């Protein structure tokens, strides 16, 4: 069974936004990782190292609101329309590949499915209708 969660992008305000959402929805963050925790980020400008790489706030029993900050130094630009993704969390690597390959057909792959330093099999793309998707299979979850 695949799980789907909304994924929001911010330009340096992810932590403030999620602190606000936490105040409204309640609960605790399931994840909060900064850019400085990723390999190679020592090359980022100082003001981008403390940005949020990934944050997750469970909302109710079945959904998790997720997000991150963009990195302007890497050419990222936040515009209406690219600040939200649908994040899929399949039960297997094979299901991740099926969903990724099917949904990305005719679209633009931004990051091919690959094993990541955080232990997941991850990739993202924009489908042929302009919708942004992430596929994240984590065998440890």
Image: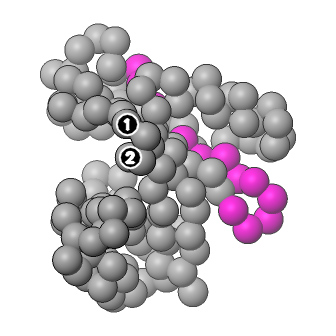
Image quadrant in which you'd find residue 106:
bottom left
Seen from the viewer's position, the closer of residues 74 and 115 is: 74
- The x and y percentages for residue 47 are 34, 12
Image quadrant in which you'd find residue 55:
top right
Estimate how packed mark 1 is, as few (under 14), some (14 to 19) or many (20 or more) residues with alpha carbons within 10 Å: few
Residues under labels 2 and 1: Cα distance?
Answer: 6 Å
Task: Assess whether residue 128 is covered by the magenta stretch.
Answer: no
Question: Is disc 2 in contact with disc 1, using a CB cutoff of under 8 Å?
Answer: yes
Can you identify the residue that label 2 sits on?
Answer: 82
Read off the magenta span.
50-63
Can you identify the residue that label 1 sits on?
Answer: 79
**Residue at (28, 63) in percent of width and height:** 125
**Residue at (36, 52) in percent of width and height:** 118
Task: Assess whether residue 55 is covered by the magenta stretch.
Answer: yes
Q: Secondary structure at mark 2?
A: loop
- The x and y percentages for residue 135 are 38, 68
- The x and y percentages for residue 34 are 43, 31
Estimate how packed mark 2 is, as few (under 14), some (14 to 19) or many (20 or more) residues with alpha carbons within 10 Å: some
- Numbered mark located on residue 140 in the image: none
The majority secondary structure of the magenta stretch comes to strand
Q: Quadrant of the C terminus?
A: bottom right
**Residue at (51, 45) in percent of width and height:** 8
Seen from the viewer's position, the closer of residues 11 and 2 is: 11
In the figure, is residue 1 to the left or right of 60? left
Look at the picture and state if 14 lies above or below 93.
above
Q: Residue furthest top?
A: 46
């Amino acid at each position: 069974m695949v799980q789907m969660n909304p994924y929001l992008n911010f330009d340096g305000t992810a932590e403030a936004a999620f602190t606000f959402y936490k105040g409204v929805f309640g609960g605790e963050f399931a994840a909060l990782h900064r850019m400085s925790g990723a390999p190679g980020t020592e090359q980022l400008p100082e003001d981008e190292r403390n940005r949020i790489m990934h944050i997750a706030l469970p909302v109710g029993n079945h959904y998790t609101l997720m997000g991150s900050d963009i990195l302007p130094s890497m050419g990222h630009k936040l515009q209406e329309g690219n600040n939200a993704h649908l994040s899929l969390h399949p039960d297997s690597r094979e299901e991740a590949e099926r969903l990724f390959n099917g949904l990305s057909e005719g679209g633009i792959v931004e990051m091919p499915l690959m094993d990541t330093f955080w232990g997941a099999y991850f990739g993202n793309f924009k489908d042929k209708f302009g919708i942004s998707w992430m596929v994240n299979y984590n065998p440890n979850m």
